[in-house]
Amino acid sequence: MSSYSRNSRMPSQALRLSFAAALLAGSAAHAADQAHSFVLTAFSNGAAGQSIVTGDYDAAVKQLDSKSRTLTLDTASISTNRCVAYSVTKHLDAAHSACDAAIRDAQQEIANLPVSMSWARRQYRDYLALAYSNRAVFNWLSNNSAAAQQDLNRASSLAPKADFVAHNLSALHNRNNAVAQVIVSPKS
């Protein structure tokens, strides 16, 4: 008899900490501007999550790079946190690869989900939506609004009620974007 074990994660609920990341401008966003800023979502209890929570993105990058050969479990969370850390630190080539990997890993998790766990399929679609939403922010940072819109459309079709998707769609349609925020949620 085989068994199946997997850490589960939920990008919404519980702890939601916001950190303004001065990605394009050096000043902090005002409350009104935050409603129209992009959000990158990371997992606080994933690899380098504590560094991301404290806003030490350079340390997060180092942790994720050093653990890349030893970590094999929960690859979607690792890729997601890499996407966020590399995007915030403006390592654009690495961010592009990590954001693409987060999508592939989330798709692979859905494909490998056993039939006995079909009840969890919606939750795993939320993870995939989160990966698309994060890549949309990366695309926006890379001045590719068309790709950002396409990724947000995919995210919206997967998780139409997700706050991070609605927030990023609103930010994309607002032409006065100056910053992006990082939202950190624990896996649940």
Image (cartoon, rainbow, N blue to C red):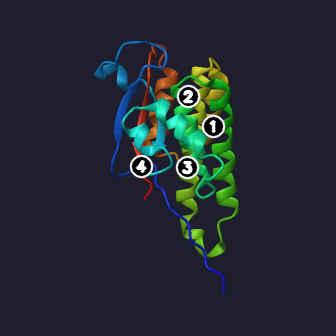
Q: How crowded is mark 1: few (under 14 residues within 10 Å), some or many (20 or more)?
A: many
Q: In which quarter of the image is the N terminus?
A: bottom right
Give 61 or 25, whichever is nearer the viewer.
61
Label 3 Cα crowd, 10 Å radius (few <14 / some 14-19 / many 20+): many
Say above or below: 62 vs 114. above
Q: Say what secondary structure mark 3 lies in.
A: helix
Q: How far apart are marks 3 and 4 (CA)?
A: 14 Å
Q: Is mark 4 on a helix, strand or loop?
A: loop
Residue behind mark 3:
77
Disc number for residue 99: 1
- Toward which corner of the image does residue 82 lie, by quadrant? top right
x and y, in percent, of residue 20 in the image: 38, 26
Q: Which of marks 1 and 4 is nearer the N terminus?
A: 4
**Residue 77 horizontal/vertical position (percent):** 55, 49
Q: Is mark 2 on a helix, strand or loop?
A: helix
Q: Position of residue 157 (x, y in %)?
A: 59, 45
Regarding residue 155, the answer to whether it shows in the image is no
Mark 2 closeness class: few <14, some 14–19, many ≥20 residues within 10 Å:
many
Between discs 1 and 3, the one toward the N terminus? 3
Amino acid type at image mark 2: Ser
